[in-house]
Image (cartoon, rainbow, N blue to C red):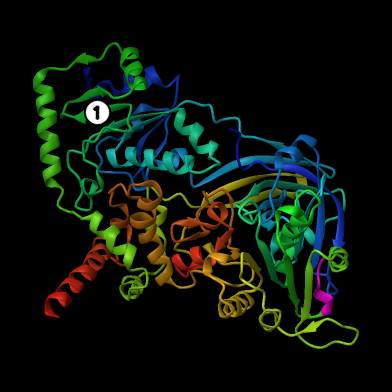
Amino acid sequence: MPNPYIPMLTKIKSIITENEVNDIKTFELEFINKEDYKKFNNIPGQFAELSIMGKGECPIGIASSPTEEGTIKFTIKKMGTVTSEFHNCETGDTIGIRGPLGNGWPIEGLKGKNIVVIGGGFAFSTLRSLILYVLDKKNRKDYGKITVIYGNRNSGEVLYRDVLEDWEKRDDIKVVLTIDREEEQWTKKVGFVAAVVKEVAPSSDNAVAVVCGPPIMIKTAQNELEKLNWKDEQILNSLEMRMKCGIGKCGRCNIGDKFVCIDGPVFSLAELKKLPKEH
Amino acid sequence: MEYKILMKNDIVKLFNDLTNDYKFYAPTKEKGNIVFKEISNPEEIELNYLNSKIPPKDVLFPQKETIFEYRYEGKDVIIEDRKDLDDKILIFGVRPCDAYSFKLLEDFFAFGKVQDEIFLKKRKNSTIIGIGCNSPRHSCFCTSVGGHPFQKDSMDLFLVDLGEKYLVEAISEKGKNIIQKLSWLLDAKNEDLQKSQELAKKSEESITTKFNFDLVTKILGDNFEHPVWQKISESCIGCSSCTFLCPTCTCFDVIDENDEYNHRGRRIRIWDTCQSCLYTLETSGHNPRPDKIQRCRNRIMHKFSYYPSNYNCLGCVGCGRCIIACPVNNELRIIIDEIIEIEKKEESEKVNA
């Protein structure tokens, strides 16, 4: 086995600014060694350790679906040392990548099920990957009804407008967009995600809810689902924690005896309730 | 089983015969402490010691180590892997508890889908010459964690100090090969073996610090939220000595050391500790373990609850370094007593009810 800390090398192929305030960008990466792309072979919901040599490494959820062949994408918010450095990058810059890491969304277990995707803010990236995956021509027949509830603080924060427009045009997916406060020109829902979940009232029948977003949104949305008779086993979360190695060695992402990097990041609410409240 | 005798004044000869094949690490005296380091002069070897301050873990998992090097050529990056991982390493004079820690570290770094090849390669290429403990320290408790002051598992060659000489026993194939190479070793007599057994018995009896860790593990599993953690963490000053000196602690941080002017650098890992608030601090400002209650609890839970559930053994070798190192005497013996007390209280409440 090779040294697991050595990244594969990629070049930045394109950079898209995702929001009005310009602190969220999507980076499309291209492997320098084409064989590495075949090896990469991610499933939705996994993450990778991205690095800029000399600046450091950080874990980022994979925004692209394996069905988008030939490309991998990461949506990065300018937050700390490494992510800020990413925002200074240009196309052609070299990025190291280790992965895919983590368990990802249970795409096999979701087969035959209705899927309710509930997302808030910038945590939508691995949800983008999941939705694109299940909507793909080859996969669509394996999954039931798909409902997406996606909330943001304001219209300027809505990510992935191109794919959202595509989805809104389709009749095999229901997309409900909401923002926190009224805005001129905004014709869609207004209100917090939890309120919209209550209004849409997705049925728990043969369904799985995938919930990603800020902690308060996750909590309130889950409360609404519980009122709608959803069971803890039907609700999936993806956790974030400080990480370094991503392979269960550096220690810091443990919740009880589980490591978020190798046992997660995806946990059902039922699994999370068994773990200490230390995340 | 083959037993040999190594006269104490022949250690120089042993060193000279083996030093060409191995990087030779041994306990040495440095600033009043015992330190394992690579030596070039056998006179530096100090075998009259209880245990080293920093465990020999740092020979295979050093406080700071390069994981790879890189250099920039324009916007391109060239990465260079480590080239020294195939070097043969010999660690001389390791105590049984520390030898056992190598097994725990090996199991830990091999756990899961992705293995830590940096550690595992070094471990594979290392030979351990251990030495029994004739006089354990007051803080030693290896017999409570499945160990023994004369335990020879996880060693290749085992020495027993018989005064003027050492009894030498080959444990593994690697050890047998060394005995063959050191053909000048003397044959051991029955009385040597007998003396060794007497020493082992006497040594075991002298260990008075004893814990019932089965009970501790059971109590910990049910008491994550117990108020005892407040009490346990109260006097902790977060110095992290307990984790930095622990032979089974494996946590590390990863950073880049960049030589900007020469367009090159290296990614290194350095020991980190769950006792630091920065360890889990996220960029958003959120911290899952913001107070010392959670951090002290994490150390104890990790060693005595998470380790048993993940690896089916305790994450402790009973060396007692954390007991000696704690500057506020908030040491393991006191902490374990507090935890055992939880059950005792519950029992007495049941009786009273």
User: What residue appears at the point 23 percent right and 25 percent down from the top-left corner?
Assistant: B8
**Callout 1: chain:** B
Looking at the image, which is closer to me, B206 or A258? A258
In this orientation, does residue B336 appear? yes
Q: Which residue is mark 1?
A: B159
- Circle 1 sits in a helix, a strand or a loop, which is it? strand
Q: Is residue A207 above or below residue B32?
A: below
Q: Amino acid at mark 1?
A: Leu
Could you tell me which residue is drawn at 29 percent across and 44 percent down? Answer: B51
Q: Quadrant of the N terminus of chain B?
A: top left
Q: Quadrant of residue B165?
A: top left
Q: Position of residue B31 (x, y in %)?
A: 37, 47
Give the residue at x 68% y 43%.
A7
The one of A37 and B94 positioned closer to us in this rendering: A37
Q: Residue at x 78, y 70 (%)?
A: A174
Mark yes or no: residue B78 visible: no
- As drawn, the residue found furthest toward the right would be A185
Across and down, in percent, residue A1 comes to 58, 32
- On-image quarter of the C terminus of chain B: bottom left
Total tally of numbered discs in the picture: 1
The magenta span reads A155-160
